[in-house]
Image (spheres, helix red, strand yellow):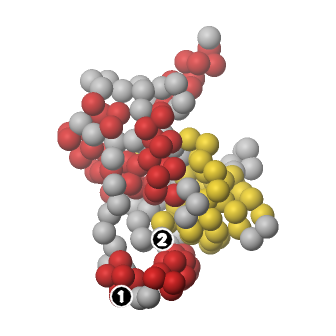
Amino acid sequence: MRRASAFNPIVALLPSRYRKLARVIIVLLLAAVGGGGSLFLQGKAVKVADGDTLTLLDGATTRTVRLYGIDAPEHGQAFGEAAGEFTRQRALFQPVALEVFETDQYGRQVALVRLADGSVLNEELIHNGLAMVYRNYCKEAFCQRWLALEEEARIARRGLWQQNKPTPPWVWRAKGKKR
């Protein structure tokens, strides 16, 4: 589901051959005015591993990106495939801008992923019940807003919240390692 952007009406007024360029420029501008991250990158999402991991093509460089502050269900876990499909539909082969907060122990860029329409993929996954706020790692001020979005998704029984007691992905992974 695509959320409206204040820029969509402006982009729609442009001749079709300029619309893609206009969206890329918007993504770049949004990256330039971003908040607390220390590094800004832009490129195209060329692969989606799962709901919260994608690969960015930045010029000739590919980077694995882990979405900051969220944890999406894993492959084989309830709603894991739905989370991956949502991320594919929203980001795959689209221009994106990253606000990178850190590089994790696996060498992945941990980032907010801004889409061409101005929305934040991390937030959309929470809103649609396809990811949980990763409380141990989500430490920015906006994480409080994300917790409220998660609660709204739970109350509305969207996505993984259709289950009575969904298993958090971090618990599901830990159980799998003990087997």
Query: x and y percent of residue 71 in the render?
Result: 49, 41
Any part of residue 136 in sight: no
Q: For the residues labelled 2 and 1, say whether their Cβ atoms are less than 8 Å apart.
A: no
For the residue carrying disc 2, how many other residues have a C-alpha within 10 Å: few (<14), some (14-19), or many (20+)? many
Q: Work out which quarter of the rendered image holds the C terminus and state it.
A: top right
Secondary structure under tag 2 reads loop
Pointer 1: residues within 10 angstroms few (<14), some, or many (20+)?
few
Q: Secondary structure at mark 1?
A: helix
Q: Nearer the viewer, residue 139 or 159?
A: 159
Q: Position of residue 54 (x, y in %)?
A: 61, 51
Which corner quadrant holds the N terminus? bottom left
Place of residue 148 in the rendered image (x, y in percent of width and height, measured from the top left) = 28, 51
Task: Give the mark nearest the N terminus, 2 or 1.
Answer: 1
Residue drawn at (44%, 88%), measured in percent from left and top? 15
What amino acid is at disc 1? Leu
Q: Which residue is mark 2?
A: 116
**Quarter of the rendering containing residue 75:** top right
Q: What residue is drawn where x is 78% and y is 64%?
A: 61
In the displayed structure image, the side of residue 114 where residue 107 appears, left or right: right
Disc nearest the viewer among 2 and 1: 1
Is residue 162 visible from the viewing direction of this image? yes
**Separation of disc 2 and disc 1 at Cα?**
16 Å
Residue 71 appears left or right of 162: right
Residue at the front extreme? Answer: 16
Q: Position of residue 22 (x, y in %)?
A: 49, 83
Residue on which disc 1 sits: 13
Question: For this view, does 101 lie left or right of residue 57?
Answer: left
Amino acid carrying label 2: it is Ala
Q: Is residue 94 above or below residue 70?
A: below
Which residue lies at the image location 74% right of the left edge and 59% below the top edge?
62
107 or 10: nearer the eye?
A: 10
